């Protein structure tokens, strides 16, 4: 087995929250600073910690904007969020093969747990590290290092899977390999510019990358 530990970003990687996030940003900005930011500017923020984004967009009203965003995001969550194809099947296969799985997210825990439990993904996760629980958020390595510590991971046999530059930079700084997902809204070119070890065209590609083998239930 090539990798004994696989860590995932959540939004945009395992679950499709892109429309929800965009709607929450648009709702928040229309209330606090209407007409000031374009859709492209909002999309460029995906993956960044919410506090950092709002502080940059409006240094004076950012705290109110964070609260507005979170209220909208939680209220609409279950109606907007979808699962990316192949995710539960691949997670179950990796889990049965003995791979330690975890989530490393820049979102607050209440929202992360809501997303995981909505699709029953929490049962496969050995560790979950959320915003504010491990020093500096991604793109700093701290959350990945905390997750690795929790499962006793070997950096040489750990893979971080994500959809944004924040995930790939954090992986590099933590000294682990990275896989970018081709379904990212950030676009292939931006992710390839950060030289991830792998690009997943579909979730099932992960089975071959991890090399769990037929004897472990990998097929």
Image (spheres, grey):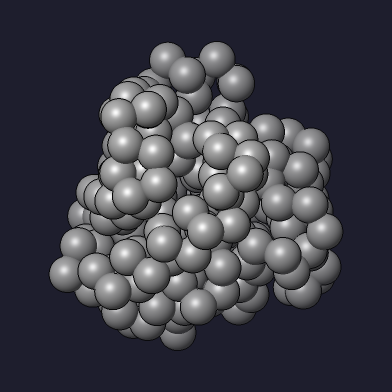
Question: How far from the left and from the top, in percent, is residue 107?
Answer: 54, 61
Q: Is residue 34 above or below residue 210?
A: above
Q: Is residue 201 above or below residue 125?
A: above
* 165 vs 212, nearest the viewer: 165
Q: Is residue 209 above or below residue 84?
A: above
Q: In the picture, residue 153 is in which quadrant? A: bottom right
Question: How far from the left and from the top, in percent, is residue 18?
Answer: 30, 47
Q: Is residue 49 visible?
A: no
- Looking at the image, which residue is at 33% across and 50% down? 31
Q: Is residue 193 visible?
A: yes
- Looking at the image, which residue is at 74% across and 69% down? 133
Q: Quadrant of the N terminus?
A: bottom right
* 91 vs 18, nearest the viewer: 18
Q: Quadrant of the C terminus?
A: bottom left
* 103 vs 166, nearest the viewer: 166
Q: In the picture, residue 83 is in which quadrant? A: bottom left
Horizontal side of residue 178 vs 184, given as left or right: right
């Amino acid at each position: 087995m090539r990798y004994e530990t696989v860590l995932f970003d959540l939004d945009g990687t395992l679950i499709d929250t892109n429309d929800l996030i965009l709607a929450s940003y648009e709702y928040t900005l229309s209330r606090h600073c209407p007409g000031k930011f374009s859709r492209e500017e909002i999309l460029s923020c995906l993956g960044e910690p919410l506090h950092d984004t709002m502080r940059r967009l409006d240094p004076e009203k950012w705290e109110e904007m964070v609260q507005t965003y979170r209220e909208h995001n939680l209220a609409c969550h279950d109606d907007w969020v979808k699962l990316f194809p192949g995710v539960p099947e691949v997670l179950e296969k990796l889990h049965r093969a003995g791979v330690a799985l975890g989530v490393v997210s820049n979102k607050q825990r209440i929202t992360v747990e809501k997303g995981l439990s909505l699709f029953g993904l929490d049962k496969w996760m050995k560790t979950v590290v959320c915003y504010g629980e491990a020093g500096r958020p991604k793109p700093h390595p701290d959350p990945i290092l905390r997750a690795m510590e929790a499962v006793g991971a070997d950096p040489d046999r750990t893979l971080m899977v994500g959809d944004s530059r924040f995930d790939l930079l954090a992986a590099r700084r933590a000294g682990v390999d990275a896989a970018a997902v081709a379904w990212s809204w950030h676009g292939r070119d931006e992710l390839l510019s950060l030289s991830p070890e792998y690009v997943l065209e579909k979730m099932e590609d992960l089975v071959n990358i991890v090399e769990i083998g037929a004897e472990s239930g990998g097929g």
